[in-house]
Amino acid sequence: MGVPYSLFGGGGSSSKRPHEDSDEDEVDSNRIPARKKLKTADYIYEQLFVKGCGSDVTVHALGKEWNLHKIYLSQSPYFSSMFNGNWVESRQKSIQMSVPNSVITIKSLDQAFGSLYHDEIDIDCDEVINLVAAATLLQLDCLVSQCADVMLENIRLKYVISYYIASEENGLTAVKEACLKWLRTNLLRWLYVKCEQEVAKSSKKNIPSLKSVANAWLADFKGKKESFLETVSGLKFASVFSALRLQNILALEKSVHVIIDDNIIPRNITDQYLALKWQMQLCIENENKTDEPNEEASFLKEIDPTFFYKCAIRCGRDLAQDIPINWRWTGYNHGIDILISHRYRLVDFKLSAHRSENEKLASTYEIIIMDIFCRTSYSLS
């Protein structure tokens, strides 16, 4: 009988010949490299998806064909309903797939199909908008979520616009909000840098800042009969300016002069708001001089919430730190002067010692407190 050889120290005879044989075997084993086996997932991807072994359905799209398998395609609701329903495609071995979205490319569709055979996929931030479009078409929610994560991690100047458009087209709410936040945070700063670069290149060295650049641009409309929003180039911005609360901006004399002098907003619109402010002032004066309010002149009526949110003056305070602080909101003419105190996440509201003559009026307020530390909000009416 032969004696087994152990790599951990000998067994059997200690004669010289067996020792020489073991050396030869060791040399031979070193000459034959061990064959590295693929992981199960990699093997399935290589054999079934890449090589198409055992394919039972061929999908044609964008001028290319994929030899695939119904059992894997059924992971996609797009194909699952097709194979399990009473459709012609459920009995066919060749399917012509319609791709209506021009953003979808052959590569992105290939990646989307490949994700059905493998749980790992490389997503390039340059091509993620193509992949998310393909994933949306195939209704692959998990892949869409992975694409959204990549987009959220790579929002910057190069991608923010394309990611925002893709988020709207594919219903990616989180990506859309993140893009808008990035634009709000960085766009003005970016414009400032761009303008400063142009100023530095120009011969007008006396222009010190972005404000001066804007003033120079606004000077083209000052003194003209036609305002900026009435021109062809300004008409597209009308919806933006219509959202301004002019009734609150025109509450200060300085603001009135600036708005009229800039000549961006048509004069007939500002005149309407100024007339409304004057009428309101007359109502206030009339009610203060009489014991009983005049019903025809009175504007103190029950206010619809929609109207309130649209017209109310918004006052805000950003508390960067949780420290004691006091402040007053001023600038409104017909309300109660309120003193606000914030101490260690407690907010107190008190009437100012200098009470207004109009304090007796039943002014309407809604106070919304946002706790930046606890991420909660409270509403007081």
Image (cartoon, helix red, strand yellow):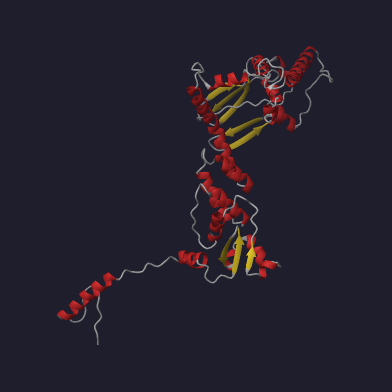
Q: Which residue is depicted at the point 63% across and 32% down? A: 368
- Residue furthest toward the right? 296
* Quadrant assignment, res 359: top right
Classify residue 332 by image quadrant: top right
Q: Is residue 357 left or right of residue 378?
A: right
Q: Is residue 150 left or right of residue 369?
A: left
- Viewer-nearest residue: 179 or 52: 52
Give x and y (percent) for residue 108: 55, 54
Looking at the rendered structure, the number of numbered marks drawn on it comes to 0
x and y, in percent, of residue 211 in the image: 55, 20
Examine the rendering and report whether any part of residue 241 can be seen: no
Q: Is residue 248 above or below residue 346?
A: above
Residue drawn where x is 53% and y is 33% of the image: 186
Q: Extreme left residue here?
A: 16
Residue 352 image offset from top left, x and y in percent: 63, 18
Image point (53%, 46%), residue name: 151
As drawn, 24 above or below 184: below
Please identify the quadrant where the C terminus is shown: top right
Name the foreground residue: 43 vs 75: 43
Q: Using the image, determine if residue 145 lies above or below residue 275.
A: below
238, 183: nearer the viewer: 238
Q: Residue furthest top?
A: 289
In this orientation, does residue 45 appear? yes
Residue 207 on image: x %, y %? 51, 18
Quadrant of the snapshot with the N terminus: bottom left
